[in-house]
Image: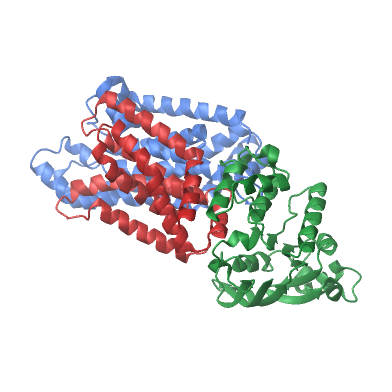
Amino acid sequence: MITVEGVTRVRGRTRILHEVGFTARPGRVTGFLGPNGAGKTSTLRVLLGLDRPQAGRALIDGRRYAELERPLTVAGALLDGSGAHRSRTARAHLRWVAASNGLPKGRVDEVLELVGLSADAGKRAGRYSLGMSRRLGLATALLGDPPVLILDEPVNGLDPAGIRWMRTFLRERADQGRTVLLSSHLMGELAETADDVVIIDQGRVVSAGTLAEVVGDHPTLEDAFLARTASRGAAW
Amino acid sequence: MIRTAYAEGLKLVTLPSLRLTLALTWAVVLLLRLADPAGGVVPYARIGTLVLGVLAAGHEYQAGGQIRTSLLAVPRRPLLAVAKIAALAVVAAPFVLVTALLAGEPGATGGLLLDLLLAAAVGTVVRHPVGATGVVLTAYEIGVPLIRTHLPDVAWPTSPVWTAAAILISVATFCRREA
Amino acid sequence: MVKSGMVNLVQAELRKLLWLPTAWVGLLLGLVAAPALVLVSAGGTRRAIEEGIAGDPSDTAFQPLGIGLLGALILGVVAVSSEYTSTGEDAPRARQLTTTLTAMPRRYRLVAAKAVALSLLVAVQGAITAVATLVLTEVVLGPLVPPADPGRAAAAVLYWVLLGLLSYALTLIFRNGIVTLTVLIVNSSVVSVSYLLTKVTPLAAYLPDIVGAHMFLNEVGDVDIAPLTAGLVMTAWVTALLGLGAWLFERREA
């Protein structure tokens, strides 16, 4: 369960997030939708304790991420890139991450197998293709077998087969009772995957609810999205 | 704490650039002993340990965004900062000892280790390994000798004081800023 | 057409360099360090001259210029290393270089354009620093040192440009700014490995970072090399290393 309440974040003179609030529930895939620069990544970074908000709070199962003792067993996160140093092998990368949270070594090979990187585990992260980097990032998120998954644009850079794989994978996680929160600016993709939708625009949540509620009378999610973010969508 | 420090140690021993720097340092130290310079070989060995320190801390900020993974795995920053220093000191100590032995002055181990930790603190603050290398080497090899020559009468703090100050500043910076 | 193409390339490279914060660190360091050293060392230098242990007095005004060289070294390094820095986290192999090579696919011309841009920048920086340093020395030490010879000042600026190009060439070869910076900073310091080598073989006096100093200083180490010879040897080194760097750059994958 993810609870975001009244999160406001200011950087310099710009207000990046303005009283952002929503929840993501267990057993459901929650899509976090917004145009580029709307505040999706900023919200996720606050949720993960990487950035500090000026007001409000973002909790995972009732606790701040930064207070968690072994955070990877509570929430797994995929941000942009692999998060691995270029010259380290995928296996060496996952080893230290596992060690930092007291996870057994065996987990490393399990997650490598899970994301389909077993054969390339000895390669340096810098030699990975974009798709492989994303898989390595996902493997890192899955190490602690967490009940909560937070993913920033998870299908970015994946090929059609990879996108379908990711969709099925996240669906399965939600069906197991986990909380899945993913951000995206791809409407079609999200309409296929999400149960609930939160739309953010210019740092404010403009719509939230089940997919059906958010779509409302509009023919598609894309129409609903464009109608609610019209302030900027018109620029194109 | 032990867990976090162990993970930081794993990071250090699996980083190719550190091994390469160490190998180069040892090779240069051995070669220079043949030349037998007047001031001993330790000043040259120090260059290697300084670069090691910068890389050990600065590699988090190189391409790939590893620092985010580190902060996601250990979001308590003071804990992570202290674990990093402890792991670096423990992992580096035997290698620095070998370096000092190769240089023919085992007594220099402590001083070299302090220099290495100071360089790591600079690497953490600067977050840009190339820039930090420039800063540290310029300060050590050009700035300090110049100051010693031109202002010989000023009583400067000793090496442990400098290192402690640098570490304090780096920990404070690391805990305060956003990743 | 071809000519204006090259001018455009150089302009683009100049602009790229001047947009880098690290390049500004190099520029400012180069500008400030030598004059600052004149002020800091004034007392000691005056004493040394009066006691007659200062060596060739005509070198006095030029010696501080050696430290400002760091700026030229940094500029040479960042001109290359900035290209190899990853630009986006979600594209592990995307670097500015990819964009640069798409915009200017002819790599030899790219290397040349960067070299010209770098030389211009370092020359301007060197000229300003040299004038500032010499004037300041004149003010601070006055009659103790002979008036500076403009020819030697020009040689010092040329030495700066050549060292900037040397650092650029080495970074092209190593593709790593840390290696270049370490080698060049160490060699311009009291623990210079090149200088140590001159104790082993006098031939080491012809290594690029030592021979260049003979261009504008009378007393460097134990070997006497005429300024013109020094300049030619230094230029030969820089040309050879730049050639090697450019050749490697042409052959390697981006």
Query: Camera-side residue: B45 or A63?
Result: A63
Q: Residue at x 74, y 71 (%)?
A: A25
Residue found at the far left of this picture: C51
Q: Position of residue A84 (x, y in %)?
A: 59, 48
Q: Residue at x 31, y 59 (%)?
A: B165
Seen in the image, is C135 located left or right of residue C121? left
Q: Position of residue B142 (x, y in %)?
A: 29, 44
Q: Position of residue A92 (x, y in %)?
A: 57, 43
| Location of residue B38 (image quadrant) | top left
Query: Camera-side residue: C205 or B169?
Result: B169
Q: Residue at x 73, y 44 (%)?
A: A116
Q: Position of residue C231 (x, y in %)?
A: 36, 28
Asked whether the viewer can see residue B79, the reply is yes
Asked whether the viewer can see residue C225, the reply is no
Chain drawn red, letter? B
Q: Total of numbered circles in the picture?
A: 0
| Location of residue B167 (image quadrant) | bottom left
Q: Is residue A188 above or below residue C1?
A: below
Name chain A's colour.
green
Location of the N terminus of chain B (image quadrant) = bottom left
Query: Camera-side residue: C38 or B162?
Result: B162
| Location of residue C74 (image quadrant) | top left
Colouring scheme applied when the structure was drawn = by chain
Query: Camera-side residue: A142 or C159?
Result: A142
Seen in the image, is C245 located left or right of residue A60? left
Seen in the image, is A124 located left or right of residue C182? right
Q: Is residue A175 above or below residue C79?
A: below
Seen in the image, is B179 located left or right of residue C202? right
Name chain C's colour.
blue
Q: Residue at x 42, y 50 (%)?
A: B87
